Image: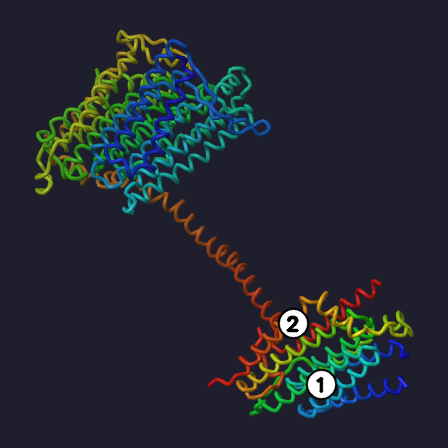
Amino acid sequence: MRLEDLFWLIPLFPAISTVLIPLFSKYLRKAGVSLLACGSVFLSFIFSSISFFLLLNQGPAKKILYEWIAVSNLKINLSFQFDPLSAVMALVVSGVGFLIHVYSIGYMGKDPGYARYFTYLNLFTFSMLLLVLSSNLALMFVGWEGVGLCSYLLIGFWYHKDSAANAGKKAFIVNRVGDFGFLLGILFTFFTVGSLEFTSINEYIKGGHLSTSLATVIGLLLFVGAVGKSAQLPLYVWLPDAMEGPTPVSALIHAATMVTAGVYMVSRMNLLYSLSEIASEVVAVIGGITAIYSASMGLVQNDIKRILAYSTISQIGYMMLGCGSGSYSSGMFHLTTHAFFKALLFLSAGSVIHALSDEMDIRKMGGLRKYLPVTFPVFLIGALAISGIPGLSGFFSKDEILLSAYLSGRKWIWIIGVITAGMTAFYMFRLIFLVFYGKERMDEEVKHHIHESPKVMTIPLIILAGLSVIGGYIGLPEAMGGRNWFRSFLSSVIEEESHPISHSTEYLLMGISVISALIGIYIAWLFYIKNPELPEKLAKKFKALYTLLYRKYYVDEIYDFLFVKPTLKGSEGLWKGIDLSTIDGIAHASAKGANAGGSILSRIQTGLVKDYGFLFLLGTIIILGYWLWKL
Amino acid sequence: MIPSIYFISISIFIFIAGLIIFFTKKDLIFVFMSVEIMLNGINLFLLSLSPNLKSQILIIFIITVAAAEAAVGLAIILNLSRIKGDVEVDTIRILKG
Amino acid sequence: MQYILFIIFCLLTILPIIYILFSKNTLYSAVALIFSFSGIAGFYALLSAPFLSLIQFLVYAGAIMVLFVFAIMLIDLREKEKRRSPFSSKIAVILSFLFGIQILLPILNLTGFLPPSTSPVNLKDLGKALFSDYLYPFEITSLLILTALVAGIIIARRES
């Protein structure tokens, strides 16, 4: 069994089910749809796993399925490649995707759009797998756009709700802005390198043909796309609104997979980014600043999903920080562990929401510890993982990132990273304390119906919790006795400098970040368990700061003023001035002209036979004259 | 023998006269008469140009058809006069469009 | 001799037509037309087509014009409408003359003074041809006449 015969089937299964489900939705009951949808993703996961093992034995493979475009020197093929980097992504996407599909059977069980939901979800899985398995920038962009489309479709899944429809539009439009930069980057790449295949690009760079300035330009342009897709500053505004979609969607698309596509892209182009100091610096700085900026907004939000959304933006900032600091493997590592615990957190939040009859405001929760015996422990595990508590996966990955940030020489970013770690711990445990401990602040009606979620939802949670615990050990650093297997696995694709560092320094850095996390947890305990009145008093005292944070720095309002309103006004002006007056005017004028001409000509039809006879005579004279002339 | 050109010119004269009557008269009956005049002119024209068997037979048929047409046409004029009240050519504008 | 007959027939044909040109009376014009058609019958005789001339006299002068006279008498004349005619008839007249000249001129040069051609047509030959070579037109014409008969009756019927 050869790798290249097998791995290209991975995206095929969800593609087939995407087509089959809507075609046969009448005949398939819910059970059929569930089986088809989850089964196809499960098959993708099985094939990804088999391909992974084949990869270990046989090495990377490439498969060209179809010559799509061949116009003079532009050759774009439908071709896939399977190397360590795509293996990681394929396993994460199909594995976590499968768990979320299963969870959705329970969560979306009573929704009338059940089949539509799974169609979109499968379409998304297909596009994402296309993105990570493609061997050239063009096909990757196809997948890139595809996931953007599915994001729009799934955010606005409950389209009769205005807020959901608007959120979907916002996501797609902001994404478009990023995609514009991405496309320019692709164009630049083509014009310098001559090909869009990753292998060709890497050879070109290794051969020393690419100048630093060009690398900077391309890197920055491609990164614009990543900023849009992965919700970094300043194109992050769509992600909090995207919480209008169903919770499993938020888990899959906006936590585990789509938003990490930007990180994957940067890692895929690591030779490019390593070449350009400036581009890497931009990546790292934007990552770091986004991390702390977003965490600050997460401190005061009251919607359980929005807290997690800001947390996601912040964590992706971490990943970008790692990549920009030269350690792409740390970024990918955090991507993997984040996929586990963020999906876990979102799905458990979904479990809470489901239990409380769709309540999402944490001010109306409390004391759920005793009602949700499965959800509570797994949620706690997720929170501990994201806070970077030693022993759990998040600790190892976050630590790698902070280490590389420190080693890259930009100490100030490292400090930002540490502070953000503390803030992360704070807002996660604020969430835990307000939801699961303390006074029960639910409505009576809601309290009446509280129930733990069914097994189809809790079993994926348990699996994800397990992964959140043990997932970090694949990257166990040498300082703690491991061999960082993850980094060496990726080393054939990702070239990183290794900075030797003494173990003691490493222990020191680890300790600092752990202490930061513990301080965060302590403050949360102080605010919400010991002195529950404290947060309100602080909020009143620092009212301006609190409002600034609560209103998300008024960024949405600023964007509206700077971009949205002028665009709307401009298009309205264009519509009235050009479309209505000019184009419709031309149509009306030609109609009137035809009418006028017709009414003039119709005067010949007098109705008098005499006149018709006259014309007859006239014609005869002319024709006869012509003939006789000819003779 | 009378040269054919005389016959030919007479026939043309008859035809043109019929044409003129067609254009200048107000009453519909005159228009109808002009048609018959023109037909006769044509018949004479035909016979004077080639006085053989074929043309004679053709002329017989023309006369026959003219008779049938005259019958139907006059019936129509009769009907029209009953409906409209008069048969002024300039007032019959039913085909106007 | 023939010339005299020719001139008589000319006058017989042309004078009534000129009268019709200037007359406003339909009845008198119809009667004048009877004379005119008789003149044409004479022309046919001069052209050695005796059967044809008889047919012309009987059918045209005898039947069709009588029909005309009857129809004219039956037309009910009531009040007249106002008329507007945008087309002046003067141009038409000029054009008609033009047309006549246009037809005459080439023939003038072509034929010159050819006498009408030779063998007079036998009635026997005519009859034979009518019932053999021209049988189809003959029979169809009889159908045509039948149709015209029926049509004429139906159209001119008084609604009762």
Residue that appears at 43% across and 24% down? A134
Q: Give the labeled residue for mark 2.
A: C141
The correct choice, above or below, for A487 with respect to A120 in the image is above
Nearest to N terminus: mark 1 or mark 2: 1
Circle 1: residue type = Ala
Q: Give the labeled residue for mark 1.
A: C61
The correct choice, above or below, for C96 with respect to A623 in the image is below
* Label 2, residues with CA under 10 Å away: few <14, some 14-19, many ≥20: some
Residue C25, visible in the rendered structure: yes
Left or right: residue C105 versus residue C94 is right
Question: Which image quarter is the N terminus of chain B in?
Answer: bottom right
The correct choice, above or below, for A562 with respect to C144 in the image is above
Residue A345 x, y percent position in the rendering: 22, 28
* Label 1, residues with CA under 10 Å away: few <14, some 14-19, many ≥20: many
Residue that appears at 82% across and 66% down? A628
Q: Residue A192 has which mark?
A: none
Residue A313 x, y percent position in the rendering: 31, 31
Circle 2: residue type = Thr
Kindly identify which chain the residue marked by label 2 belongs to.
Answer: C
